[in-house]
Image: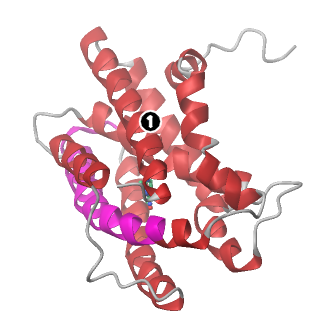
């Protein structure tokens, strides 16, 4: 009963409206195959090589977001949250290198697939100073939330995730990362509440694009191209 009069947040509203797309991104056949233990290890290696390329492009995106927060944010703590994200990415880049060597994936010779290039180009478009902080931070939340939801599901009750993939799932599926995504969602909602219709509709369209790219990104693990 206590929750009855609580207003539904903008992001919650979008997740309800675009539930089918959100579910395709967070319950993709690739991550579901990790969860049920049937994963094809060559698919996992393809994902690993492509994701390293993505993460390298993600770093300057988050750096551009830090700059927008510094210029536009009404809340000092936003900078600290984003800086924490950059620190985590520093660790993540090292992790990708050691994980790649563990699986004998050569990162220096991995060629970015078309979907990956397009997603990286989309990230680059969000780095433009023309893109509003609210739109960019909402995109950031969506990008992080897909990995958090997808990999947390691989560790939840009843999962049969192979031992050698648990560390990967932990990286994005751990409770701390869940908390961090929740904080990003709160920042995005706070900004959206104060935004014009124009910014709100741009942010919604951006979230939809992110979710579509995330589905296509998981699709690359099939290696059909
Ligand atoms: C394609 C994609 N989307 C989101 C993430 C998670 N963020 C940073 O690691 C990721 N690694 N890759």
Secondary structure type for disc 1: helix
User: What residue is drawn where x is 47% and y is 81%?
Assistant: 95
User: Who is closer to the viewer here, 76 or 219?
Assistant: 219
Direction from residue 117 to residue 162 in the image, left or right = right
Answer with the quarter of the image where residue 162 lies.
Answer: bottom right
Direction from residue 112 to residue 215 in the image, left or right = right
Crowding near pointer 1: few (<14 within 10 Å), some, many (20+)? many
Identify residue for label 1: 211
Direction from residue 111 to residue 39 in the image, left or right = right
Residue 155 picture location, percent across and down: 76, 60
Q: Taken as a whole, is the magenta stretch helix, strand or loop? A: helix
User: What residue is drawn where x is 62% and y is 13%?
Assistant: 7
**Figure check: 173 above or below 185:** below
Question: Residue 99 magenta-drawn?
Answer: no
**Figure check: 35 above or below 185:** below
Residue 128 picture location, percent across and down: 12, 42
Residue 141 picture location, percent across and down: 45, 42
User: What residue is drawn where x is 58% and y is 61%?
Assistant: 172
Total marks in image: 1
User: Who is closer to the viewer here, 86 or 104?
Assistant: 104
Start-end of magenta stretch: 46-74
User: What residue is drawn where x is 69% and y is 51%?
Assistant: 32
- As drawn, the residue found furthest toward the front would be 224
Asked whether the viewer can see residue 141, the reply is: no
- The colour scheme is secondary structure
Asked whether the viewer can see residue 1, the reply is: yes
């Amino acid at each position: 009963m206590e929750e009855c009069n609580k207003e539904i947040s903008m992001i919650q509203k979008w997740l309800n409206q675009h539930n089918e797309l959100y579910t395709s991104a967070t319950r993709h056949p690739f991550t579901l195959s990790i969860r049920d233990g049937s994963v094809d290890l060559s698919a996992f290696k393809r994902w690993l090589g492509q994701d390293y390329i993505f993460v390298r492009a993600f770093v300057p995106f988050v750096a551009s977001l830090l700059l927008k927060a510094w210029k536009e944010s009404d809340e000092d703590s936003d900078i600290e949250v984003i800086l924490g994200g950059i620190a985590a990415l520093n660790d993540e880049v090292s992790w990708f290198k050691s994980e790649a060597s563990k699986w004998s994936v050569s990162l220096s010779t991995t060629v970015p697939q078309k979907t990956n290039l397009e997603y990286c180009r989309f990230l680059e478009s969000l780095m433009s100073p023309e893109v509003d902080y609210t739109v960019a931070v909402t995109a950031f939340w969506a990008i992080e939330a897909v990995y958090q939801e997808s990999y947390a599901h691989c560790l939840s009750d009843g999962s049969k995730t192979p031992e050698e993939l648990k560390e990967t799932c932990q990286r994005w599926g751990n409770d701390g990362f869940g908390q961090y995504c929740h904080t990003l969602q709160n920042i995005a909602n706070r900004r959206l509440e104060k935004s014009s219709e124009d910014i709100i509709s741009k942010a919604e369209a951006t979230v939809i694009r992110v979710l579509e790219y995330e589905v296509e990104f998981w699709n690359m693990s099939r290696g059909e191209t």
